[in-house]
Every structure is written in structure tokens, then in C-alpha cells.
Amino acid sequence: MRRPYGEYVNPRTFGTWLTSQRQARGLTQAELAHELSVNVYTVGDWEREARTPSLANLTSCATWAGVSLELVAALADAQLAGPPLEGGPAVHRDQLSIVDGGA
């Protein structure tokens, strides 16, 4: 799923988590991309929440960060849900297709 620039960004999502983890380790997006074997633009898209990683890439990110896949998947799920619609529930991930952010 691609999200337009400037659209709602949940502070507890995969993109914001990945940015904070990368910065805490003192890495650039290019260095993280190299460690995860993906393109640097892919890391940027993930951090801006323009794309959501595939399950394989979520697994790589979890391993890199030393956290459970369940945590990373929950953050990606929150990212897909987006903001609640006015007067209605948030869109569920089953209603959206996930675009692989791979290399």
C-alpha cells in the first residue's frame, strides 16, 4: 500500500519504530539498507510509511533489531490501519493489499 506524502502517520507504527531504531544505532538509511539487503529507497519508503514491508522483510527487521516478529508485525498492522475514519472504524489490514518493499 502506498500512502501519499503528508498523510496521517501513527507514532506507534513500523515506520517510526524503524527510524528510531536506526537512529539509536547511529546508522544512515544506506547502512541499514545494506544490513537488510534492500535498496536505500526501500528503507526511506518504510520510514515515511509510503510502503509496508513484506513478511520476509519484517522478519529481517525483527532479527536485525533483536525483537520478536510479533512486535514488528503489530507495528506494521498499526501502520496499515491508519487513522480512524470520522464516525467509523479504522480500515482493517484484510481490506488492503501489502506491497513488498524488497530490493
Image: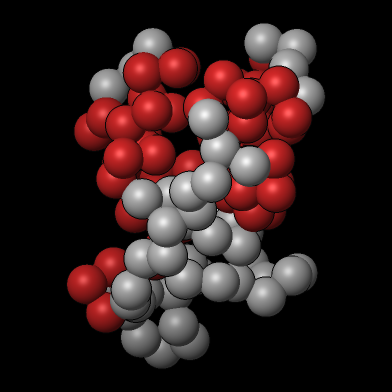
Q: How many marks?
A: 0
Where in the figure is residue 54, as x and y percent of width and height? 36, 50
Looking at the image, what colour scheme do you see? Answer: secondary structure
Is residue 103 found left or right of 20 in the rendered image?
Answer: left
Q: In the displayed structure, does residue 71 sit left or right of residue 64?
A: left
Position of residue 83 in the picture relative to residue 50 (left or right): left
Instruction: Name the image quarter holding residue 80.
Output: bottom left
Side of 14 relative to 60 (left or right): right
In the image, residue 80 above or below residue 88: above
Q: Is residue 45 visible?
A: yes
Residue 19 is situated, as x and y percent measured from the top left of the image, at 65, 33
The correct choice, above or below, for 64 with respect to 86 in the image is above
Q: Which residue appears at 35% of the width and 86% of the height?
A: 88
Q: Quadrant of residue 59?
A: top left
Q: Nearer the viewer, residue 11 or 25?
A: 25
Q: Give the residue at x 74% y 30%.
A: 30
**Residue 42 percent across, percent down from the top left:** 61, 48
Q: Residue at the far bottom: name it.
A: 87
Residue 8 position in % (x across, y down):
63, 67
Q: Give 13 or 53, whichever is nearer the viewer.
A: 53
> Does residue 71 appear in this view?
no
Residue visible at 28% across and 68% down in the picture: 93
In the figure, residue 60 lies in which quadrant? top left
Q: Residue at x 31, y 40 (%)?
A: 56
Q: Is residue 64 above or below residue 61?
A: above
Residue placed most toward the observer, 46 or 89 = 46
